[in-house]
Amino acid sequence: MSAADLRLRVEAHVRRHGLIDPGGEILCLVSGGADSTCLWHALGALGYRVAALHVDHGLRGAESEEDARFCRERLGAEVVSAPGPGRSEAALRDLRYSIAPDRLRATGHTASDQVETVLQRLVSGGSTRGIEVRRRDGVVRPLLTLWREETEAYCRAEDLPFRVDSSNAQTQRGLIRAEILPLLRRLHPAAERNLLALAAERPRLPRRTERALLGLIASPAGSARVDLGSGLLAAREYDDVWLERSPVSLAQPVRWGPWLLASSLPGLRVRTWRAGDRLAGRRRKVQDVFVDAKVPRSERELWPLVVRGDEVVAIPGLVELDGVTARREDEA
């Protein structure tokens, strides 16, 4: 593949994901390696207004100094000193990304990095989540469709010198790159492309949440609930499944959908309707109250109930209780 063809692939990826405005400004985070050198040169050749930034962690003595000099002289990079001894790889990454947060920044991550990330996360946490095309802080990855061998070939084709980090072999990524991936290729020649495909799959729910939901669906009980954490419950009533908030104390005013609830009475909580709920001290079912008030079934599962223990003491807008106020803001 020619250098021009590679640039067309980069441009197609950038346009597909809207990473950089046409002719827009972009700050390339450069290390001096083939990937970031390719990034800097290709984006400039495509007509983007490119600047470069090198973060010097000073981890490799004279070699780090030479990396910084290379980036400054060859790539025109601004060099920022951010001492890294004693910091983890993740902490160093966060430190780099904390610099120039007001500017759109790009990194030279490639498909090869994507494969290594998927493999690392798969064995360490069971996740196949890959590198994001765009981070939440705005950092973008224009080279994710290229392989590392292609960025090196691009640099040679364009007569671009680049640096080689001697410490790579000592990292987890270095172990994956030098030892694990060659073994996987022996098992199957398409191992890397198959791992790359995992990163494109839709993210799965956390395993605990998956197990809880599967157990809820498989339960022989006519109705059941499971706690999903983070203030959420999953509920099933025969063939219907929905999410609802966990009970919330009414010691302070509570906003529940369009409702604003408050009370000076102790021991009250707010939750949603459950099959079999009855009004406190009465035989009347909450479901019958909803039916008589012509509340659609789709709204019943989100309607707030005020409870004390397991007893329903008020249904805002339908059954009032002295000491509890309820105002529906969408009707104000």
Image: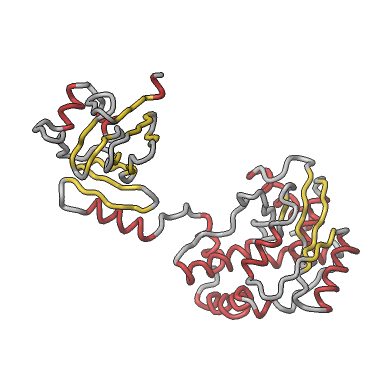
- Residue 48: x and y, percent? 80, 46
Q: Is residue 170 left or right of residue 78?
A: left
Residue lying farthest to the top in this orientation: 332
190 w.r.t. 170: above or below: above
97 w.r.t. 281: above or below: below
Q: Nearer the viewer, residue 249 or 183?
A: 249
Q: Is residue 259 left or right of residue 236?
A: right
Q: Quadrant of the N terminus?
A: bottom right
Q: Nearer the viewer, residue 29 or 12?
A: 29
Residue 186 visible here: yes
Q: Residue at x 65, y 80 (%)?
A: 170
Q: Residue at x 11, y 35 (%)?
A: 281
In terms of image quadrants, where is residue 53? Answer: bottom right
- Residue 158: x and y, percent? 85, 61
Residue 154 visible here: no
Q: Residue at x 35, y 56 (%)?
A: 209
Q: Quadrant of the C terminus?
A: top left
- Residue 197: x and y, percent? 52, 59
